[in-house]
Image (cartoon, rainbow, N blue to C red):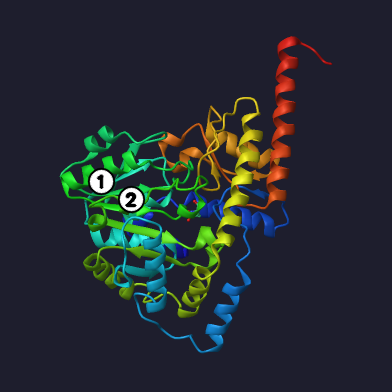
Amino acid sequence: MNDAISSPRLAARVCGLAGSATVEMSERIRQAQAAGAEVLPLASGDPNLPTHPEIIAAAHRALQEGQTRYGPAAGLPALRTALARRLSARGGAGYSADELLVTPGGKFAVFAAMMAVVEPGDEVIHFDPCWVSYRACVRLCGGVPVAVPALGTIDAGRVAAAVTPRTRMIVVNSPVNPTGAVLSRDELAALLAIAERHDLWLLFDQVYAELVFAPDGFVPLQSLPGAKRRTFIADSLSKTYGMTGWRLGCLAAPEAAAKAVLKVIQHSIYCVPPFIQAAALAALALPESIVERHRERFRRRRDVAAAALGALPGISCAAPPATFYLFPKVGGDDKAVAAEWLEKLAIAVLPGSAFGAAGAGHLRLSLACSDEVLDEALARLRRHYLANSRDKDEIKTGSTA
Ligand code: GLU
């Protein structure tokens, strides 16, 4: 008897949901590596930065001191205060601890904010291409994701045209995963104006805010007058401090909205483990020079990789102003190119179409790997494309030289 066939029915919200392309590719790489295969991982936004020893020591200390029980659902007061201070210091609006909730990663901050706002059938506008989980989180809340193409700049007219009486929220992400773009003040102001006109929430995902290469290149949405009262901010320590596995993020929101989201936290995860929060406090106390070093490392990799990819026939690659992602245009079928790179070169990247229809014809490369892995991947690509273009020339000229 087949257990799967005889089991009761599952909810449509999960049956109809596609898995996360980023997470599933990471699983695939892990399994291949465990089986002894060599794969160069340029797929996931999982920085190869070792967690700083002081962060690890703080977690040890907290465990030894007995911080092994439940903590406050909203997060440790000291961490909420430190996060509020950091957010306020970035410029723009001032935040207090009461407006901050500690979440297990930025992803749960996104999900919890949507749970507090989106009712069944409500529409949430997002840009395309975008991070793979926005659409899924909207669906899990019973909502309807509405894509507005925005591969380059955001066209406010298209956003305004996408608003209907069911629209509740616009998801704004800057710097942008997967393109590495940073939204300008004018783009953000246009979105805020639309949100104000239709009384919508804005969800601002700024998890790459510390990875903007130009000084003062990042404009926080909440810095715009009037934005704070309708904005949820999702943030994370993952990318900045090499803490992806610690699952430490936060959600900032007007106090009444934060109180509503707190109920989602109480009834789901209860709290982020207090010893993880103690580690996060240690991360926030580290000197700014550590973050600068990380940023500089990613900027160097971006320069090297964008130049190397752009030199390959058929590929054009801009050097984005932020993040550790490249989004080169490869032309043709991006899924086929990604599959070819994986099969022939053992280089794992993601097809741009995984991030939305507007991403088709592109690949997303994550430069969060080590310098050695990146150099090896670029060398393999160079050899592969050179050999292929030589073959084509030979076919064209009939030459065998
Ligand atoms: N955000 C990262 C990425 O886009 C990590 C995986 C995920 O959360 O989707 O690769």
Mark 2 sits on what residue?
Answer: 221
Residue 162, image x, y percentages: 24, 38
Q: Which mark is residue 192?
A: 1
Of helix, strand and loop, which one carries label 2? helix
On the image, the x and y values in percent for residue 46 come to 56, 56
Residue 355: x and y, percent?
44, 43
Helix, strand or loop at mark 1 = helix
Mark 1 or mark 2: whose residue is earlier in sequence: 1
The image quadrant of residue 229 is bottom left
**Residue 170 to residue 333: above or below:** below
Left or right of 345 on screen, residue 334 = left
Identify the residue at image location x=25%, y=51%: 225
> In the figure, 42 relative to 282: above or below?
above
Q: Position of residue 80 (x, y in %)?
A: 38, 72
Question: What residue is shown at x 35% (from left), y 36% (from top)?
Answer: 154
Extreme-right residue of the structure: 401
Identify the residue at horizontal 37%, vertical 67% (top origin): 84
Viewer-proximal residue among 66 and 297:
297
In which quadrant of the rendered image does the C terminus lie?
top right
**Kind of residue at disc 2:** Leu
Can residue 309 be seen here? yes
Q: Which quadrant of the structure image shows residue 364?
A: top right
